Image (cartoon, coloured by chain):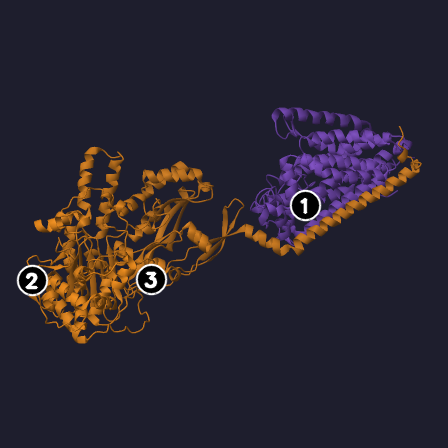
Amino acid sequence: MKLSFLKKKTVTEASLSFTFTRRAMVVGGLQAGIGAMLVTRMAWISVAENEKYNLLSESNRVNLTLIPPRRGWIIDRNGRPLANNRTDFRVDLIPERMTDPEGTIRNLTHLLSLTDDEVDRIKDELDKSAGFRPVQVAEKLTYDQFAAVSVRLPDLPGVAPSQGFSRNYPAGATVGHLLGYVGAASAKEFEERKDPLLITPGFKVGKDGLERSFDKELTGKPGAKRVEVTARGKIVRELTTRPDTPGNPIKLTIDAGLQEYAGRRLATQSGSVVVIDCHNGDVLAMASMPSFDPNSFSDGISHLEWDMLSKDDHVPLRNKTLQGLYPPGSTVKPMVALALLEAGISPMDTVNCPGAIRVGNTLFHCHKKRGHGSLNMRGAIAQSCDIYFYQMAQRIGMDRIASMARRVGMGQKFPLPFPSQSYGTVPDPAWKLKKYKQKWQVYDTVNATIGQGYMLINPLQMAVMAARLATGRQLMPNFIFGAQRPAPTPVGVDEEHLVTIRDAMSAVVNGGGTGAAARINLPGVMMAGKTGTAQVRRITMTERGGGVRSNASLPFKLRDHALFQGFAPFDNPRYAIACIIEHGGHVNRVEDAPMIAADTMTFLFDQAKAMEKLETLEKDWGGPPADRMARQMAAYRLAKAIEKGEAPPPQAANAANAANGAEPGNAATGATPPPPAPPAAADDDDTPPPPGPGAGTAQ
Amino acid sequence: MSIVPEPLTQFPWRVLGILLAIAGFGTLVLYSAAGGSITPWAINQGVRFIIFACMALVLSRIPLEIFARFAFPAYGSVLVALLLVELIGGVAGGSQRWINLGFMQLQPSEFMKPIIVLAVARFYALLPVGEIRRWNAIWPALVLIGVPFMLVLVQPDLGTATMIAAGGVTVMFLAGLPLRLFVGSGLAFACIVPIAFSFLHDYQKNRVLIFLDPESDPLGAGYHISQSKIAIGSGGIFGKGFLQGTQSHLDYLPEGHTDFVFATMAEEWGLLGGLLLIGAFMLLFRWGIGVSLRAQDKYARLVAAGLTTTVFFYVAINLMMVMGLAPVVGIPLPFMSYGGSSMLTVMLCVGIIMAIERSGRRGSRPGNWG
């Protein structure tokens, strides 16, 4: 077969040989060409692009680990730490370095006394671990435990003890609501800030209170550790380490001793105490109890503890000083009296109190059923006569009272470094029209003058009111020590009127008035103040006919709030104080607002005396708050276990008793809410949301 | 006549020197790749080189006629082995390239690389001169190349199949077939590539796509090429220094002792090491082409040039792959990459070329072309 197109040339041996030589040269040339191309390519990569690939090679090789910065301290006015950092010893396992996992875990269990739960968790995490990623064995170890593991390291391959810092609040629960707590950043926070520090293990951000407000100042600059790692992430060696820069300290106006004292003095009650310096408005203490322990919150609270706290009818999760709103009750009477004086009413004008008066269609009662008889202003304040104020307030009208209420700080919003605050209300005709589209009625005025009805106040506002009544200056509450601020504007009342009011408030405490329990037994220091009772339920006519039920016979949630506001010394005010006991109902004189206020005030003048009294009293309450909380937690845990059938029934009765004993309200009031705490929180809309996404589920 | 005894002058000192330099360097690189240890790679590779070098020297003493005579039988037996691999592979499933002989594993496709050259060259040596421009000069060669090519392609081993085809076609080109055929086929090939691409396995498609844009998947399938380029690029002109490579020592470079050994070398020895190595290979190829040009015998010429080109393909494809100019096809770098099969093949080629050089020197026999 012949191909015509191939037959154009005659082929000979010689021409073929020539063709071969030529083509072999071509092949050789092509090879040389490709060789040259390869050399060019290599030169391009290794010389022209050297910098780029060097960088890539370094970023492969070097792993930058951030060292979380130590958080700035929060210190009190005297430099005592309210929040500092504790050296935290911890132990991790590096799975790929372990030779005998079973034996190592057995050793560690013995050395660190790990519980079965923890051993199971460690084994579980070891199974899932990628090899080089450490598995946490335990944190918050004592130095002895840490040392015990460290000296045995040669026998424990794969065990890595290390040292870090964790937040510490020496005063525990008593500063919980004031300072807030810290926790690992949430996924959302990382989305917003994109800071790799946020996802560094061990780094915590402020989650609530001052920790959150001053997070930026308290957070320092992270250190960095450069390590050489293999492609599989195994660390080969450390290259360099740059130490962290701790955050700035924050100096507060708080007096650490006073803060802790106030928190402890609140005893088993659900209440709050605020103390303000009358010279400049500095807040010396702001306690809200019961509270959570910020130490355990910052480590990640257990589900059980969260559960217990959120179900407690004493609402330990709410900051009552800033988020609790209460009818101020009779504590507004000095303020109303000041408005009366301003309106030209003489302090000597008297009103006869028959026990009740009719306003419109309603009969308004005095708290004293038989009536006080004839009273002037001093007597009306001292005896807290309602009828006097019903009558007088009608003479001057609500607008003047509301004006005075605002000037002494009720309903005022203060620029404070706290993430969430609730502000009380000062009602007046314009307000009611706007809010409810209703006309102001005389009975509204009557209600408002005794601090009921629409009127609401939070404990801080009440303390501000006390301070302003004491000084006649519009002091602003402040938490930062030495903060620059303008001189306070005057309330705008005659000094003479203030003297009258202070004298009347002194009579409340020292002149046979309603606040005798608030008397301070110190020479030269006399407390002035005003008690208050805020009803939380409506008293029907039928009940009133048969006699108003005593608070002690009522369920906790229906009892009156007990309030007290005051200052000392009455003639030259130095400190102002406010105390509110939720559902206190005045059933326990020692744990009632006036005496708590008096003892807290005493602490400012004579610490030793105040402490001595507290320590005596605390024995009856079951020790300091930390002890009580621990017992409450143990009882709750046991109760839960019985509920789940994990504990035998005979113990159930004991557990119930134990829980009864530890239940804060019980010992004092004799009421019998069943343990665990009644599910009041479920229908209680003021239970605050969980402190953070992870908190409810953290182990 | 020189004063040096004839056996010594005939001994292929020059080429052995080149090989020794390359393999010595390779052993050094493997020593570093193992983290500064002669085990497990360097020692094996060194011993292998010595054994295979001896084998090549023995081959060089064999008269060329033996290679010519046994070209077709050898071709036939390797083809049978390829078929066997395919059958066993069908049973075992997956990609099957090996026959397990008990004491060692045999990869017949590896042997096909030099033998296809021997077979096609033999065919053209036997072809009468006048027939070279006829159809008869084309189809038998195409069959010779096509059958093993398809067998290896379905294994599937694209790299080896390509090398078999390239080796055979190079011999066809050198044998004097009309240039138009190659130009035409080249154009046709360019048209077929997209169609052929659609028949490739998914992993092969991926390799090709990632070769075109390795950064598209730096952690997945493009990882090899990316890391290899980082290793070469970070080496710079003089390299990071012996035993100082981080890409290889910290395991970022995959296959750093086999297919990507050049990157391991370049990271530590830099552009300088690369130049020396490529230069050494170029000297080897110049020697091979030189032998073919000096050879008088038609068969000898075709075989020498064909085998040289086969070795060249190893080097070129591997280096292009390592430098990101070709997809990852699994062709090792001769004498440098750890592994026995490729060294055996390349030494076979070198041994046969040495035999041709030897017979050419003796020059006693007139060739076919007179």
Q: What residue is shown at x 61% (from left), y 25% (from top)? A: B92
Front position in the image: A5 or B105: A5
Q: CA distance from mark 3 to mark 2?
A: 45 Å
Front position in the image: A318 or B174: A318
Residue type, mark 3 in image: Pro
Percent from the top left, x then y, of residue A179? 31, 58
Which chain contains the residue that carries disc 1? B
Colour orange, chain: A
- Dot 2 and dot 1 residues touching (CB under 8 Å): no
The colour of chain B is: purple
Q: Secondary structure at mark 3?
A: loop
- Mark 1 is surrounded, within 10 Å at the Cα level, by few (under 14), some (14 to 19) or many (20 or more) other residues, namely some
**Residue that carries the numbered disc 3 in the rendered image:** A417
Residue type, mark 1 in image: Phe
Percent from the top left, x then y, of residue B256? 61, 43
Q: Is residue A272 left or right of residue B136?
A: left
Q: CA distance from mark 2 to mark 1?
A: 113 Å
**Residue that carries the numbered disc 2 in the rendered image:** A372
**Residue that carries the numbered disc 1 in the rendered image:** B25
Asked if labels 1 and 3 share a chain, the reply is no
Task: First in sequence, mark 3 or 2: give its number.
Answer: 2
